Amino acid sequence: MAVFGLPMEQLYMYVLLASGALTVLYVFFGDIADLKGGLPVFNLTVILAFIIFGSAIGFLMETATELSEWAILAISGGAATILTMVLYFLILLPLSAAESLSAYSEEPLPGQMANVIISIPVDGYGEVVLENCAGMISKRATGYNNEAISQDEKVLIVEVNDGTLYVQASKPRTL
């Protein structure tokens, strides 16, 4: 059987090469084409993986077996579906969940303690560092009541506004 005047082996190889080239382009320019909130079936990574798996298996079966073209198309489509599902559920889905866990949010910052690494002048800005599960993060900070706070002093984050932390010096507890 020939499609577009090409033998099936050649057609599978052209589709494999084209989808491989699209995958390389997607790696470099994937943020432009990223469709958040869509169904996973319409995820470009999943579509390209299905096409690559199907065309690679089809090409190998066309060259290595004597099965009919329709049987090879059905087998390669089924195998590509199974492999794509395995890729999605065992690799892509856990990776996207891990990515969202390591994301940084400013919501839980008020009430946390930080350490001043660049002193905060009156009516000015300095820098504080705070530790969380992802590591250490340094942020711009200013005194909550326009107070000066020296370097290496512990501070309490009172408020976050436009990426700036409003802090006040922490008073040591006396028992």
Image: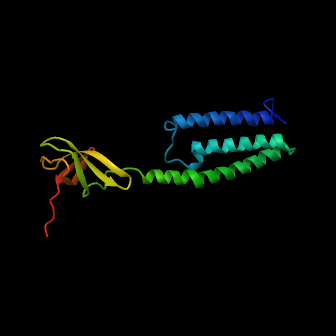
Total labels: the figure holds 0
Residue that sits furthest to the right in the current view? 66
**Image spot of residue 148 (x, y percent):** 12, 46
Residue that sits furthest to the bottom in the current view? 175
In the image, 96: left or right of 62?
Answer: left
In the image, 130: left or right of 60?
Answer: left
**Residue located at (54% from left, 53% from top):** 93
**Image spot of residue 79 (x, y percent):** 72, 50
**Residue located at (29% from left, 52% from top):** 130
**Residue located at (70% from left, 35% from top):** 15
In the image, 102: left or right of 40?
Answer: left
Q: Quadrant of residue 73?
A: top right
**Image spot of residue 126 (x, y percent):** 20, 43
**Image spot of residue 41 (x, y percent):** 60, 48
Q: Quadrant of residue 7?
A: top right
Q: Quadrant of the N terminus?
A: top right
Colour scheme shown: rainbow
